[in-house]
């Protein structure tokens, strides 16, 4: 039976979203003869009934394009949707209205491509009886039950290239160079780029640091004749006993906004070591641009498998990478827990073996 599939991209954008849309649309149309409609700007498009019909030609040439042709939003929650009326703001649960709209329009299944918040809401829709399939994306690589999210490898590539560039200038000027990277409460970008780029210190949220130990490492290197050091710090990293730096304006945002840790530790390191220290905040460069081949392939694998699940009517699941195979797990098992780095994991141990300090 031909089906009509709705698809949306929600949460923060990341490289590979267009590639996954391409895979969903092409597989649905070419292999199964389904119809696909795309909702604009994440869940907001569902609330507003703002959609476009997607043809195979609409997704041609998208493999190497960053961003998402559907647009996205990381602030619109369909179960607690912000409505402004006559200057007043109220929050409303729009989920029943969305389900009615989807039924009226004959949408058999909704494919939600997103991070933890988007997938949590997919799970909530599934609990209300909607046919949903989740596809995990995140530069942060923090979604549980999948070994990898697409977008992550591109972010690691960008951060590694930044370390490579910082290395040459750090060495020339005998400076400490700090690179602050994204990742929220998981240090995956920092540890992988840190290992790939040969950082001397890696600070991640999973291992609270002691700034004196960081300074000690820098001085040890100086005493060995290496007058420069590279520190990569994850935006969610924090000193022992301290909270993560959150710069969100609570009057305007309900979400934490991490960042600022790089400048904080730069000042402390300069005071403790008297070595000239500079900070680079990589920011949204990690989210933009062309996906690396790994992410294009993973996006395609996830997109194709999502449509296979729809064909088998295995709803309420998320596609996932396990043992380098694409399989599906119930959305119920995925949400509410973040995948973080275990302090005794192989990555941490190999970094320590080659002399990296975690500031402990
Ligand atoms: O989740 C991806 C991410 O890039 C995080 O690493 C970062 O903390 C956050 O999004 C930034 O969000 P925004 O684009 O709203 O500033």
Image (spheres, rainbow, N blue to C red):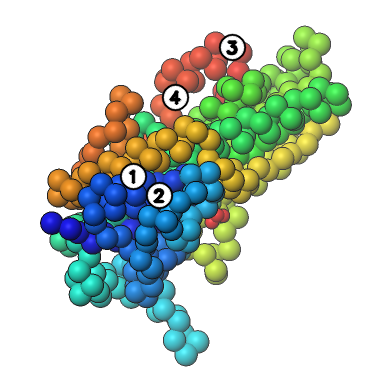
Q: Is mark 2 within 8 Å of ligand 1?
A: no
Task: Give the camera-side residue of 87 and 286.
Answer: 286
- Residue 354: assigned label: 3
Q: Residues within 10 Å of mark 4 (few under 14, many from 20)?
A: few
Task: Give the number of the mark in front: 3 or 2.
Answer: 2
Task: Give the number of the mark in front: 3 or 1.
Answer: 1
- Residue 313: assigned label: none
Residue 130 left/right relative to 260: left
Q: Is residue 31 visible?
A: yes
Residue at 45%, 51% in the rendered image: 60
User: Which of the two labelled residues, at mark 3 and mark 2, occupies the earlier sequence position?
Assistant: 2
User: Which of the two labelled residues, at mark 3 and mark 1, occupies the earlier sequence position?
Assistant: 1
Secondary structure type for disc 2: helix
Residue 230 left/right relative to 44: right
Quadrant of the image for the C terminus? top right
Residue at label 2?
Answer: 22
Residue at 70%, 27% in the rendered image: 164
Secondary structure type for disc 3: loop
Q: CA distance from mark 1 to mark 4?
A: 32 Å
At which x and y percent is residue 226?
A: 79, 15
User: Which of the two labelled residues, at mark 1 and mark 2, occupies the earlier sequence position?
Assistant: 2
- Residue 343: assigned label: 4
Q: CA distance from mark 1 to mark 2?
A: 8 Å
At which x and y percent is residue 102?
A: 24, 69
Kindly indicate whether the residue at mark 2 contacts the one at mark 4 (C-beta within 8 angstroms). no
Residue 337 left/right relative to 89: left
Secondary structure type for disc 4: loop
Q: Residues within 10 Å of mark 2 (few under 14, many from 20)?
A: many
Kindly indicate whether the residue at mark 2 contacts the one at mark 1 (C-beta within 8 angstroms). yes
């Amino acid at each position: 039976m031909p089906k009509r599939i709705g698809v949306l991209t929600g949460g923060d954008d990341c490289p590979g979203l267009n590639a996954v849309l391409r895979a969903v649309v092409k597989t649905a149309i070419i292999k199964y003869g389904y119809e696909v409609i795309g909702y604009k700007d994440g869940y907001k498009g569902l609330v507003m009934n703002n959609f476009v019909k997607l043809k195979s030609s609409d997704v041609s040439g998208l493999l190497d394009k960053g961003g998402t042709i559907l647009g996205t939003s990381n602030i619109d929650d369909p179960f607690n949707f912000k409505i402004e009326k006559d200057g007043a703001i109220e929050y409303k649960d729009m989920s029943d209205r969305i389900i009615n709209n989807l039924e009226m329009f004959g949408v058999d299944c909704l494919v939600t491509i997103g991070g933890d918040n988007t997938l949590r809401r997919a799970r909530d829709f599934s609990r209300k009886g909607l046919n949903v399939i989740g596809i995990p994306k995140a530069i942060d690589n923090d979604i549980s039950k999948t070994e990898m999210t697409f977008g992550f490898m591109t972010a690691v590539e960008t951060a590694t290239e930044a370390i490579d560039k910082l290395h040459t200038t750090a060495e020339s000027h005998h400076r400490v160079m700090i690179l602050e990277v994204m990742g929220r409460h998981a240090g995956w970008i920092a540890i992988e780029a840190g290992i790939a780029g040969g950082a001397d210190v890696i600070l991640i949220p999973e291992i609270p640091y002691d700034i004196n130990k960081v300074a000690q490492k820098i001085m040890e290197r100086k005493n060995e004749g290496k007058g420069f050091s590279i520190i990569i710090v994850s935006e969610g990293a924090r000193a022992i006993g301290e909270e993560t730096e959150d710069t969100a304006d609570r009057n305007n945002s309900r979400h934490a906004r991490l960042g600022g840790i790089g400048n904080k530790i730069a000042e402390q390191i300069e005071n403790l070591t008297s070595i000239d220290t500079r900070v680079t905040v990589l920011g949204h460069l990690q989210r933009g641009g062309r996906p690396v081949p790994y992410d294009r392939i993973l996006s395609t694998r996830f997109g194709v498998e999502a449509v296979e699940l729809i064909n088998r009517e295995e709803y309420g699941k998320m596609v996932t990478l396990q043992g380098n195979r694409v399989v599906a797990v119930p959305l119920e098992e995925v949400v509410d827990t973040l995948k973080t780095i275990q302090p005794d994991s192989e990555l941490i141990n190999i970094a320590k073996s080659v002399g990296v300090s975690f500031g402990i």
